[in-house]
C-alpha cells in the first residue's frame, strides 16, 4: 500500500490568557521522496537526505531528523512566532501513514491481542518485551484508518493511548522516541474528536485533563529527540527521571535502536539466575557489557546514584 509523509504545523496562540490551537497539514507522496529532492513545506525548505524502506533522514528548519517509516511519530520543539499582540508558538509533527484512500481497517481483535500480551509482560516485570509490540500498536493507531472510520474514532484512540501511557506499558527512559510517538498521536487525536464521538462509556471513563500531563511530556521529549546533548534536552531528561538519575546516553537514538536486542540477550544470559536480592547488580553488569560490545558506554543506576543503596 502506498504511504504518505505527513507534516503537520501546529500553532498555539495565547491572547489575554485564552489559548487556541490551529493545524495546517501537508502531505508528500512516497514516490516523490528520493534523496536530493527538495520541497517547500509550510513555507520552509525540506531536503531529503536519504530514504529506504525503513527510515528517512531529512533536513528541516536547520535540523536533521531521522524517522522510522513504520512506527515513529516525530514532534519538534516549539518555535516562537513574532506577533505584536499575542503570544504565538508553532511546532511540527512528522509521520508516515497509509494513503487516505487505503481501505486498511482497524482490527479490534488484533489490538486486544497486543494489549493482552503487553499486560502479561508488565505483570512479569518484562517491559522490554513490549517494545516491538508497542511499535506495532503505534503503527495500528497511525496507519489503520488514521483518523475516523466505522470501526474507530479519534476519541477512542486517545482513550486507548492514555491508558497505555498511564499504565507504563513502556519506559520513557528506555525508549523516549517510542513514548514520544504515543504522546504525539494522543494529542493529534484530541484535536480531531467531536462531541458525537463520546458514547456512554467514554463520557464516563475519558480523562479530559490528561492532556496536561501529556503536553509536559511532549515538550521534554521533543527536545530530547531533537538534540539529546543540548543543555535544554539534558535538563528535560533530568526532570523526567524523578528521584534517580539516569545516564543521558539512554536519550540517544543509538540506544533506542539496540536496547531491545540488548535486553533480549541479557535475559537469555541470566535466565537461570535467581531473581532475588542482589540480582540487579548482575543484571546491570551484563547489560553494560552487552552495550559496550555494541559501542555504547553506559552507567548503571548505581553508578549514576552513588549515595543510593540498591538491592
Image (cartoon, rainbow, N blue to C red):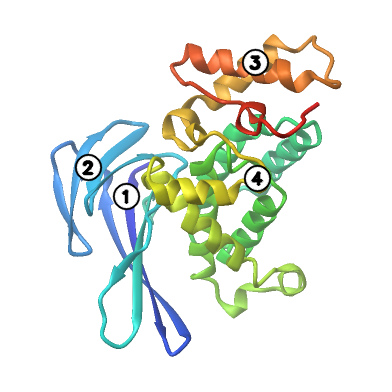
Q: Are marks 3 and 2 in contact (CB under 8 Å)?
A: no
Q: Are marks 1 and 2 in contact (CB under 8 Å)?
A: yes
For mark 4, what is the residue? 111
* Relative vertical location of residue 305 with respect to residue 111 in this rendering, above or below: above
Q: Which mark is residue 285?
A: 3
Q: Which mark is residue 5?
A: 1
Q: Are marks 1 and 4 in contact (CB under 8 Å)?
A: no
Res 105 seen here? no
Name the element at disc 1.
Answer: strand
Res 293 seen here? yes
Q: Residue at x 70, y 68 (%)?
A: 206
Spatial CA distance of label 4 from label 3 is 36 Å
Of tags 4 and 2, which is closer to the observer?
A: 2
Of residues 103 and 201, the one nearer the viewer is 201
Q: Callout 2: few (<14), some (14-19), or many (20+) C-alpha neighbours within 10 Å?
A: many
Spatial CA distance of label 1 from label 2 is 9 Å
Of residues 127 and 278, the one nearer the viewer is 278
Q: Give the mark nearer the N terminus: 4 vs 2.
A: 2
* Relative vertical location of residue 98 with respect to residue 42 in this rendering, above or below: above
Residue 40 in the figure: left or right of residue 172: left
Spatial CA distance of label 3 from label 1 is 41 Å
Amino acid at each position: 500500500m502506498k504511504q504518505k509523509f505527513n507534516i503537520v504545523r501546529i500553532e498555539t496562540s495565547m491572547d489575554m490568557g485564552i489559548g487556541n490551537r490551529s493545524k495546517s497539514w501537508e502531505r508528500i507522496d512516497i514516490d516523490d521522496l528520493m534523496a536530493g529532492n527538495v520541497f517547500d513545506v509550510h513555507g520552509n525548505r525540506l531536503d531529503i537526505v536519504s530514504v529506504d524502506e525503513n527510515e528517512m533522514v531529512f533536513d528541516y528548519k536547520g535540523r536533521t531528523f531521522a524517522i522510522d517509516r513504520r512506527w515513529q511519530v516525530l514532534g519538534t520543539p516549539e518555535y516562537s512566532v513574532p506577533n505584536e499582540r499575542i503570544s504565538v508558538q508553532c511546532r511540527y509533527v512528522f509521520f508516515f501513514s497509509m494513503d487516505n484512500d487505503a481501505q486498511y481497517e482497524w482490527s479490534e481483535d488484533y489490538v486486544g491481542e497486543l494489549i493482552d500480551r503487553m499486560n502479561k509482560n508488565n505483570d512479569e516485570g518484562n517491559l522490554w518485551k513490549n517494545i516491538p509490540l508497542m511499535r506495532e500498536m503505534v503503527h495500528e493507531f497511525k496507519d489503520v484508518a488514521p483518523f475516523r472510520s466505522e470501526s474507530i474514532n479519534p476519541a477512542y484512540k486517545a482513550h486507548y493511548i492514555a491508558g497505555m501511557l498511564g499504565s507504563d506499558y513502556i519506559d520513557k527512559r528506555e525508549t523516549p522516541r517510542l513514548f514520544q510517538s504515543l504522546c504525539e498521536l494522543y494529542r493529534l487525536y484530541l484535536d480531531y474528536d467531536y462531541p458525537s464521538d463520546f458514547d456512554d462509556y467514554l463520557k464516563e471513563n475519558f480523562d479530559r485533563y490528561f492532556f496536561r500531563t501529556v503536553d509536559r511530556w511532549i515538550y521534554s521529549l521533543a527536545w530530547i529527540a531533537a538534540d539529546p546533548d543540548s543543555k535544554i534536552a539534558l535538563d528535560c531528561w533530568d526532570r523526567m527521571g524523578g528521584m534517580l538519575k539516569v545516564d543521558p546516553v539512554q536519550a540517544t537514538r543509538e540506544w533506542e535502536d539496540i536496547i531491545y536486542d540488548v535486553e533480549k540477550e541479557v535475559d537469555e544470559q541470566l535466565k537461570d539466575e535467581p531473581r532475588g536480592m542482589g540480582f540487579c547488580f548482575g543484571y546491570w553488569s551484563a547489560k553494560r557489557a552487552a552495550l559496550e560490545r555494541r559501542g555504547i558506554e553506559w552507567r548503571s543506576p548505581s553508578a549514576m546514584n552513588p549515595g543510593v543503596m540498591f538491592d
